[in-house]
Amino acid sequence: MATTPLRELWRLTAHARYFQQRGRIYAYHNQIGYLLAMSPDIVDLLEFHRGRARTPFEVDGRFGRHFGRTQLGEFLSVLEDHRLLVDADEDEDEVVWRMVPVRARWVVFHQPTVEDLTFWRALGGRPPESEVVPAWAARFWARVDGAATLSALVEGLEAEGVEMPSRAEVRDTIVGWVGSGRQALRFSKVPVRRYGAEWRWPPYLRSEMPFAPWSPGERLEVDPLEAEAEPISPPHDYYAEGVEDAESQFEEVETTLSHLLRRPHALLGGATYADRVVDALIERGMVGVGTRRVVEVGAGQGHFAAGVLKRLGERLPEIMAGLSYTIVDLSPALQARQRQTLREAGLEDRVVWRRANVEEAGWIEGLVDPGWRSGGVDRDGEGSEEVVEGAAVARGVDLLLCNEVIGDLTTVRLTRASLGLAEGAGGRLSSEGEAVVAEVKGLCEALGVSLEDAPESFFFNLGALRFLSRIKDLLAPGGSAWVTEYGDRVRYPSPASHLDHVEFSVHFGHMAAAARGLGLEAEVEDVQALIGLDQGGRALATTRSWFAAFRAMLAGFGVEIDKVAWTDRMLVEAMGEAVSMAHIGEVRFEAADQRCMGLLPHEFRALLLRVPGGVVGNVQGFGHRGRWKGRRP
């Protein structure tokens, strides 16, 4: 078999462990840290080598027809390169001595002296835990620089007379740091300087493996992303029933940019996110002396609503007596937390709540009197209003606010073939799938959304367009909407994995085209520019598991921190004399516009909408650079 003679005999490494996420299998190398995604038939290929060495002839006889000889050879090369298949006679324990230890990208530790080292970890959503290591191991960790081999590092310690256990115990201790339950270390074949800048390093050296364990023979999770034209992990069920703890939802599961900047912040010049949003809305004429009715969809913990009301009272006190503010949310737990937040701010009596699914046509019922659309409306700021079942029923809403919600609405996977954009028939669809395809075609045709540039298979923000299609019926003439989310003007949606659900980025090009197709004025702008985020500032860079471990470590010193956009100065002040930043690792601060905690602010967009006609903010239409034309209030 000329295409596959990499070794005469292969066997499965003793260090392979399997994991899964959303129906995908990953092999993790517990000795080196390699991570390789694979299909079930590649697992079969690996498992064929478990317990005995295999010859190329045996491998070809078992898998040659299934993969084809050329592809089989390629697969065997990859598996050998990742050391999942090794020479039958190779001593794997000896190989690591020639490799270079590299500190993992996301590891929390406290090392006040060269001989005192404690690791903290909270991998895979597990509770944080700590591990104190021996003095010799602490000295070893202090020497790890991504340049010296394991052998050279240990020999250096021995030359200094450091008291150490046997070589075998040393190796097992250090290799143990690589294991899936610790992930403090990786091994590289070469010094990392050869790769260049850190972003050029192989991915396994700069990432963590947070997936769930899996064993061959166990049932794989069904990948929710694979089904065509069917709602992916229906989000409404999750928010209606799955959110139990509103505090942990935004502190641990899905932190938002508005949550990180909910308090006065140096990155916003001492303002809050809500302050800057209101200022931007006033500057663009989206809020003004004619504003009477505000609706917020998906209000999180209520901090944004409290901030908006406070800022409006400061900037436009004359509108507050007649202002109504309605929150629409699907989660009972979040609504309860919103009430608490607004109560603590002394603003609960200014807000009414409504529980509804904003993808459904009826969600605006009770918010808008349908009579205004046919009978006309006097937009002199004195529009009629009444209260029905605790929610403001008005002749049109002046301002709709929606922060980082539409990525949680229904997304579907489609193909060009199923939409008739490519030759050939698409996959066989369920009746629900056929209805989804018909709905997508109808929406795109009616709203002028083009999918001509779509790849063969792609995700589509169906729920976001459903929501958008109702906005015109909600907004009064001259009314505006502020809709933000993680996304791009031209890229198709991609999934983001949270601890317990899936959400998607948003194709803002589609959203803007649909809005214009509805007769709305629409512009897409970068959120960081709209809120004036200090792009020269630096913020703490984290992952969920890293921050959980970091917070637990600080709590051990009596320092309590929550989820905000921490700058280095803020963090040093919070730690005070309890613990020194110099003794903590790996604490990294990056440009705030590039990474802020676990978010990427430069990839958040705002869709700014306005219904032509009427006067809310004493302005008329869009102007240069997306600002509204006319006189600012």
Image (cartoon, rainbow, N blue to C red):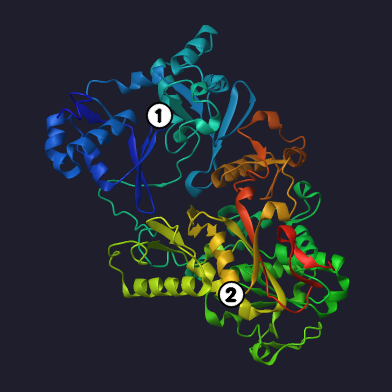
Quadrant of the rendered image containing residue 33: top left
Q: CA distance from mark 2 to mark 1?
A: 55 Å
Categorize mark 2 by other alpha carbons within 10 Å: few (<14), some (14-19), many (20+).
Answer: some
Residue at the spot of label 2: 518
Which comes sooner in the sequence, label 2 or label 1?
A: 1
Q: Which mark is residue 87?
A: none
> Closest to the observer: 340 or 441?
441
Residue at the spot of label 1: 32
Quadrant of the rendered image containing residue 30: top left
- Asked whether residue 633 appears in the rendered view, the answer is yes
- Which amino acid, by three-letter code, is at mark 2? Leu
Q: Mark 2 touching mark 1, by CB under 8 A?
A: no
- Asked whether residue 13 appears in the rendered view, the answer is no
Give the residue at x 49% y 64%.
461
Nearer mark to the viewer, of 2 and 1: 2
Tell me if 431 is positioned left or right of 454 in this view.
left
Give the residue at x 34% y 56%.
221
> Closest to the observer: 123 or 138?
123
Return the x and y of residue 56 as percentages of the image width and height: 16, 30
Quadrant of the rendered image containing residue 111: top right
> Closest to the observer: 306 or 465?
465
Return the x and y of residue 151 as percentages of the image width and height: 44, 14
> Closest to the observer: 488 or 351?
488
- Which amino acid, by three-letter code, is at mark 1? Ile
Return the x and y of residue 200 as percentages of the image width and height: 50, 31
Quadrant, the N terminus: top left
Return the x and y of residue 467 as percentages of the image width and height: 56, 72
Location of residue 58 with respect to 314 vertically, above or below: above
Give the residue at x 49% y 66%.
238
